[in-house]
Structures are given as structure tokens and as C-alpha cells.
Image (spheres, rainbow, N blue to C red):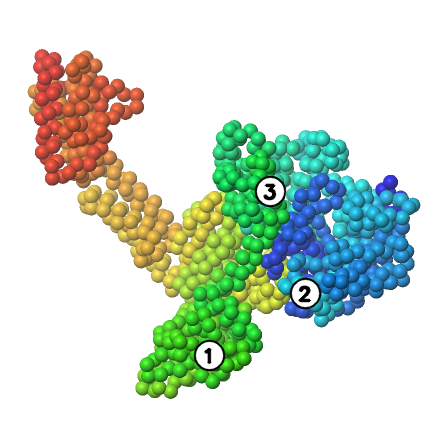
Amino acid sequence: MYLCAQQLKLIRSSKSIRREFIEYFTRNNHALIRSSPVMPLNDPSIPFVNAGMNQFKGIFLGLHSPPAIRAVNSQKCIRVGGKHNDLNVVGHDSYHHTFFEMLGNWSFGDYFKEDACKYAWELLVQVYGIKKDCLYVTYFGGNEKFGLKPDLECKNIWLKIGVAEDRILPFGMEENFWEMGPSGPCGPCTEIHIDHTMHAKNQASRVNKGHEDLTELWNIVFIQFQRLQNGQIIPLPTKHVDTGLGFERLVTVLQGKRSNYDTDLFQPLFKAIEKAANAPKYEGRFGTADKDKIDTGYRILSDHARMITVSLADGMLPDKNHKLRRILRKAIDISENTFKTNKLLPELTDCIAETLGEAYPEIPKNLSKIKFIIQFEEEVMKSARSTAFKSWKKIVNSRPELSVITDTTFPGLTAGYFELQRDKVKSLPGDFTYKLYDTYGLDSEIISKLAEVESIQFDARAFKEAIERAKKRSRLEANKVNEDFVSIDTLNQLESGNVPKTDDSYKYEYTYSDKGYNFPIVKCKLLGMIRNGNLVSEPESMLNIDESQAIVEATVTSSGNIVETDSVVNTNAEVGIILDKTPAYAVAGSQVADKGHIQINNLLFNFEKVLKVRDYVIHIGHFVDWDEEDPDHEVRVGDECLISIDEKHRTGTMRNHTAAHLLNAAVQKLLPVVGQRGSDVLKDHLRFECSVFGRKLSVQDVSTIEKSVNDVIEADVPVKTKTLNILEMFKEDNLTLIPGEVYPDTGIRVVEINSDILNSKEACCGTHIHKTSVLEHFCITSMKSQGYNGVSFKAVVGPVAHLTRLAGDNLRERITNIENEFTAEQTSLGELESKVIMEKRDLNNKRKRIQYPYIVTQESLERLETLSKNIRIKEKKRTRHTIEEEIKILLDSSSLPFIVNCLQPTNTSIENISLKNIIKLCPPSTPTLVIVHCKNKIKARCFVPHELQSSSFNAQMWMNEILKIFDAKGNVFKDENPLVSYNMVPTVINEESAKILLDKAIATATKFASIYVDQSKKNKPNK
């Protein structure tokens, strides 16, 4: 039987169990460290934080100091990919989860193996009251391949503590050597396993054999090594302790339950599902016993709901993390298919906030945002499913075997299947399966099912290898920063030659006075030059400018010998200068690089671009100012230089960067949820892109955003900056971070602007102004939607913003003048229409020379559209009045029993004339044919009353005579009889031949009617 409550000291809630753990270690001088977000902010190698030690990696590598020599924490962890991937077994057993909590205690160079083991044993046995007869321990048994000996020290510690020798078991690398990933901190570990039953018989033979009733409970890692990229394992300079105690498993033990899902971490979620979906009660069935898969659905949905809620609370976004989106959609699927409702996920977030909120206050704090994103994703999935399902259903109808694939939310499912069919092979190559994954968005499960239907072998291992190759290629691409200019070999040569890294901290050293910003001129030394992708670093003379103004390229071999190449480069060639220090800002964090000058001896070098690669700052530009009469110009390694930056350019970028932060804060204040996608900070303007999760921004919204930013500018708020390491950054509240961005372990700059109007706090490596009044003014010049989820702003600040406002005022005044002219009827309608068209064309021109405020642009387009509409209405009225007069005169003067007429109005368009209404002006008993000629277009309509129709004469026959002349087409309006009314569609006519053709048409129509309309039946038109 399983451990029951009577065998424990007391029954504890999950909250009290977590508290007891923290309190035990804080009593033993451990500092409490808050959990880091599950978003891996400083490690691009993992999709989620997957272990308690992730946030301490920089400490283990010696990159920064620990916050305390002893620490304790409860870390949120997610394992859905990579080495630690528990996704496929979640819900099918009693203890695996996508999201789980890792309780841990840490020693950073303080205590080591003996104390770590003592703390763990004392807490489990004496504090929590677990019987030691239920516990087994393992230790590292060594590995000859890597020269690692068995950890007998650890074994002896357990013997000393009092653990029986037959309960202390050695295991190899896989079980007892912990590694975070392919490279990084690692070391032997010792694990504590628990037998959930009260067997009198020793169960040592069942440890690490995958039994659900005998599982690992606590892993104590002795971090004393580092695995390098080449696989070599080397000692770390300082030894550390990293322990991980699975919280869900501990709660299961202490609450005397059979399964993690039977604890108070999951039971409230099950009750919420049961109530909301009116579902059968959870019965805890597994495997074949769970025939209807209801219990499995309970477990998967609850697990995934926890993972989704925690991820969203930590700022992760589904459109930035496809694994999160896949799990979210899987949870929605289970909600709809198993529990027949699509409203479960938002309901479950309330329960999760209750169970986890005490430990992780960011969950209840962000609850409304979490629900908003989930509901938005439900709508997106519904739309995607609707579109994809229709195309997939057609395929399934012709191939019923494919009905086993029920997840039709993949937009690329149909196209991916066709691709699979087209390449008929016996087995799927890894690169092809990766294409199905990368191009069409299909996961391994879908690919496997498709291959099975098509009787094609799917090699899951080859698929994983292809993904790893792609990741490797991606990493290589990331390292090929501007390789067109600087090669990897050149960078390696710099490092192997021990060329010092560039100190660019001077880019943040500038002051502000009433006259503006002052940027220092920095005295520095020349370390090297890059030209044609190669390093030129000859110790004595790197660059000779002779009478022919040519540069002789030279490189240095590994032995130090100088090798001159055959290439001769003109002084106009682009060159990269490396200095020991610089105030120049290299392109980073969305901010454009500085421009400036370097004075080397009596030579002037202008740089237009700045790159920072592997901490070398490369100034790219041209030598410009040399004396042709002096043949002895030389540039040497170690030459002293003076470097200065373009003050106007830098001030512009600083203003725009600070404005981008304020814009971000204003949008976040206005909308329920905002996800920053990216930005571009240039000298003259800024661009800011973000996800708005289906919210459509109005002109009024833009006005609100602008007002918020300008109010902060008016308030003259200080812009504060501080520098933190990664652990210090985790402690910051309300910090805006960009999902997917990788932050360094040290030297993280946080820019903060606090006011009653807006609060902005962002981790940012860019340069900023010192107070908001320097911005002078802020103006949004454009806002564009980006798909269903995104929006892009363009904005300006400073003098440019004032000019933009002035241009907007001038635009408003011009439109007001046009409106006044229209009202006063001082100008012809044609001339007014031309003015309106010109203003519209200017506003809609993407390359317009003058930019206007977005609000003014939208307001002006509305006013211009209203003007256009009113001009058309007035044109129609005038045209109708003119036509009515012309028809009246015609009816008064005509003695024929029919009407044939050609109207040629001016100052209007053919679309403004209704022939239907014109014919209504004529007597209903009189056959009528009217042609309109206007601005190189013609159209016509004719009418023949029923009593005058015959086999030789009707509306269609009459009009056909005209259609032949103009080579035009005829048509009839809906619900009209072609014998009664018939039309000529609008047709372009050559103006040179228009009069001849129109005269011919009038004569032809008159002659045709004269033959068939009886003169005696003429009804004198009413006057």
C-alpha cells in the first residue's frame, strides 16, 4: 500500500510543503532567490528554463558573482523539447509534467558534498517525517572514457549519515552525471529515490528501472566540471552544489497519494473541469483502464493549463514560441473534443492563480492578460482550423485513410501532404522531414501519421538529427555577422593573436548642457585594420600612402612573418579600423550605429558604419584627408588616434530611442496586452512594431498615445539608467523584456522613466537622453496593420516633430480653403475636384517628400472624401438639371413618335449620370434611346413600351444597331426585360472619331425607329 497520512507527521497542503522547504534552508543561512521567468533570457540553446540551475549558469562559469554564497529557491521549469522532453508521456503516467516546480538549495563555493547530503536527509526524514526505510540513494559510478572515477567520497558520506550500504547504488553517466545541455556546467550527482509502498523486502534492484511506485525524488548535483563544445570535460575553478527536488512528487509523497494528479495541485483543476464541462468525475484511470480517455484528458488539460498560464504570466507569447502555441492548441483541442466545450482554459487559470499565486505573484497579477491571450488564440485557432479543414476535408473524402489525422490546425497540412505524395520514396530522408516541419509547420506526430498512411518509413532519429543540423547552421549564420566585410578567419586571427578587445564603455559617457549634448573626443590606439575581409596588422607599417595614393595589403602569418599580397587597393576602398577604445556605438538593440571621424597622425578617417563582433568594435569607412605632396604618410600598429562621433547623428538616435521606450509604455498602458516585436531607431525617426492580439487601433487611440508621450515630455522626467547582472535583473519588477532576446550575464543596462503619466522600464543596451524635455515634441506619422495580430508605428521627435506638426497645420488650412471655395461656389467643380485629387494623391504617396501627423492624415483623408462625395452630388444635381432642361426642350420641339438623343455634359464623369433616371423624364408610352458621351467614354440605354413591341422592333433589337457602330457590348439590369429595356455598357471611344460615330449612331437609331414605330400612334409628349 502507499504511504498513508498516519505514517507521516502531519497532512500538509502543497503551499505549506513549499513554505517548509524554504524556511528550513533560510534557517540554515540560505538566501531566498525568486524564481526566474521560464523564458530563457540569457540562454538561446533552450526553448524554456528547464532546471533550477539555469539562472545560476553564469555563476558556475565565473561570469559574475553569486547573490549569496548559499541560496534556496523554488524554480518554475518547463520541459517540452531538447534533451529534457517529457511532453509525449504527460498524462499517460502519474508523475511527468510539462510544467513543474523544482525546489533547490545552492552552494556557490561554500559547502560541498557532505553538507548537501546531510541537509537533504535531515529535511526528508526529520522535518517531513518520511521513513528512511522507504529511501534509496545513488551515486556516480565513474566513466573510463572521460577519465572520471567513481564518486566513492559521496558513497562514504551516505554511509556516515546512516544509510544502509545495500541501499546505496552506483550508476553511470546517464543516471548520475548531470549536464544542463550539450555544453556547460556539469558534474556527478547523487539521487534520493523513494519507494511509495511499504515493502519489507529491499527494493534496491528496482531503482532506476522505470517503476512508477519507486521514483527519483531529489537530485543533488556536485558542479565541479564544465563540458566544452568539443566534448572535453574540464574542472571548474570553484565547486558548487545544485540540488533539485521535484515539488509535485514531494507533495504526492507527503499527502499520501498514489499519483501527482491526486494532490491539491491538480484536484481543484479537475473539479473546475468537471463543473464547467458537466463531465464525468475524474477516477484516476491509466492505460487500458481509461477506455474513453476522459481521465487522460483531465490530466493533459490540467498539466498544459499550468504550463500555458505560467508561460504567459512570464511574458512568453504564442506567436514567438511555436512550442507554446502547439501546447495551447492541443489544450484547446482536448477541451473541445474530450470535454465538448471551448471555455475551459480561461476558467482553469483562476484555479492555477489560487494554487501557485502565493509562490509566484506574477500569475495573479497578470491574470487578465493571460485570459486575453488565450481567448485571442482560441479565435485564431478557430479561423485557422476553418480554413485548413475545408481543404483537408476534400483530400480525406478521396482518401478516407487520412481521417486518422484529426488535428487540422496546421495551415501547411494540405501542401505538406501533396509534397509527400509527389516524392514517392520508401523512407523519408531527414532533410525532407525537416522541410515538412520547417516549411509547412508539421510536427513529428503528423509526419509519422502521414507516412504511415502512405506506407513510407518515418525515421524519427533522422528527423531529430536534421533539426540539430538546422540549429547548428542557424548558430553558424548568427556568427557570420557581416562576413562580407570581416571573415570568421579574421576574427579568429584577432583572438589567437591576443589582440585586446575594444573598450566601448565611452559610448555611454556624455553630458548635457544648455547648448546641447557634449560627446568626448577619446584618445586611443590603433590595433589593426581590416580590408577585403582580411586583417592587416603588420607591426611597423600597416598602411603606406604613397604618391600614387595606393594601399599595399599585408597580412601576418602565424609565425609573425609579413606576407604582402599582389592586390593593390585604392585609398577609396572601404576599410575597417580597430581601436583599443572608442566612444562609437555599434549597431545593436535596434539602434543604428554612430558616424564620426578618426584622426590618425595627420590623416583623417571618416567612418559611416560601426560593427561589434566578438567584442571587437570595427569602424568602417574611408581615408579622405591626406596631403598628396607628402609621400611619407604611414599608419602603424600602436599609433595614437583621436576619435569623435557625429554629435547631431547621435543626438538624433538618442532622442528616438528614448521616444521608442515611451511609445512602448503608452501602447502598453492603452491596450490589455502588448508584445513587442521589434523596433528601428534611426537619426531622423523611429519605428516600433508590436503584437496587439486582435485589437484594432483607432485614430482616437493614436491621439491618446501621442498625448501620453507628450505629457511626459512636458513633465521633464529624468531618464535613469542602471547596470545589472542577470540575477539582479530577475529581481526587477515591471521590467519590459523582448521575447526571444538574449541578454548577457553581466552588464545589462536598464533604462527607467517613472512619472504619474507613464512608467517605462526596459532592459536596453542603447543610448538615451537624460531627461524627457530634450525630446521637445513627439508625433506619430504612420500606423500600419501587420496581419491579424500586429501593428507598426513610425514616429518623429524634436525639431522634426515640430516641422511635421506645422506641415499638418498647413494641410488642414489647404483643405479648409477648398471647403470654403466649395461652399461659396467661387470655383468650378472640375477645378475643385482636381485640387481634392491632388491632395489625396499626395497623402497616399508612400514616397511623399513632406510627412504629416498620422492623425492629421486620417482626418484629412476623411474630409477630402467628404468633399469628393459632395462635389459628385453637386455635379449630379447640376448635370441632372441641365439634362432635364435639355430633355424638356427636346420634348417641346420634337414631332416624332419616339425620342433619340445624345447628351454630352461637361465637368462630370459618365459614372455620375443615371440613364435610367433620364428615361423616366420621358413619357412612358414613347420609345426612347439616349446616348451619353462624356470624357472619352460613352454609354446608352433604350426603352420600348410593351404595346409598341413587335417581332421586328424591341429594346434589344434597337440597341443592337448602335452596338455595331461602337463595337460595344450590351447588357440588361437584374429583373429587367431585355425587350423593354436594354443597355450599352460604358465603352472607351476615340475622341477624334467620336463626332462621326455619334452622328452615325443617332442617324441609325432614328432610321430604325422610323421604320417600325407607326406615325399614327404618336402620342404628343406632355409639356
Q: Amino acid at mark 2?
A: Gln
Say which label, 3 or 1, has the lower sequence index. Answer: 3
Looking at the image, is mark 1 or mark 2 nearer the viewer?
1
Q: What is the distance, in whole Å, between disc 1 and disc 2 at their CAs?
A: 35 Å
Q: Quadrant of residue 825?
A: top left
Tell how many labels. Answer: 3
Q: Residue at x 42, y 71 (%)?
A: 532
Image quadrant where residue 514 sits: bottom left
Dot 3 amino acid type: Phe
Q: Nearer the viewer, residue 29 or 293?
A: 293
Q: Is residue 432 above or below residue 987?
A: below
Residue 445: x and y in percent read 61, 41
Taking the image as shown, residue 610 lies to the left or right of residue 345, namely: left
| Residue drawn at (32%, 45%) of the image | 863
Secondary structure beneath disc 1?
A: strand
Q: Which residue is mark 2?
A: 232
- Specify the label residue 563 is tagged with: 1
> Residue, x 78% and y 42% (percent of image)?
259
Residue 825 located left or right of residue 355: left
Instruction: Give the image location of residue 639, x and y in percent.
Output: 47, 84
Mark positioned earlier in the residue sequence (2 or 3): 2
Q: Which amino acid does the dot numbered 1 rest on?
A: Val
Q: Quadrant of the N terminus?
A: top right
Mark sitting on residue 288:
none
Which residue lies at the image location 67% right of the left edge and 49% below the top edge? 85
Residue at the disc numbered 3: 458
Answer few, some or many: residues within 10 Å of disc 3's Cα (few below 14, many 20 plus, some between 14 and 19).
many
Using the rendered image of the protein, determine whether residue 538 is visible from the camera's viewpoint. Answer: yes
| Label 2 secondary element | loop
User: Cα distance, mark 3 to mark 1?
Assistant: 54 Å
86 or 942, nearer to the observer:
86
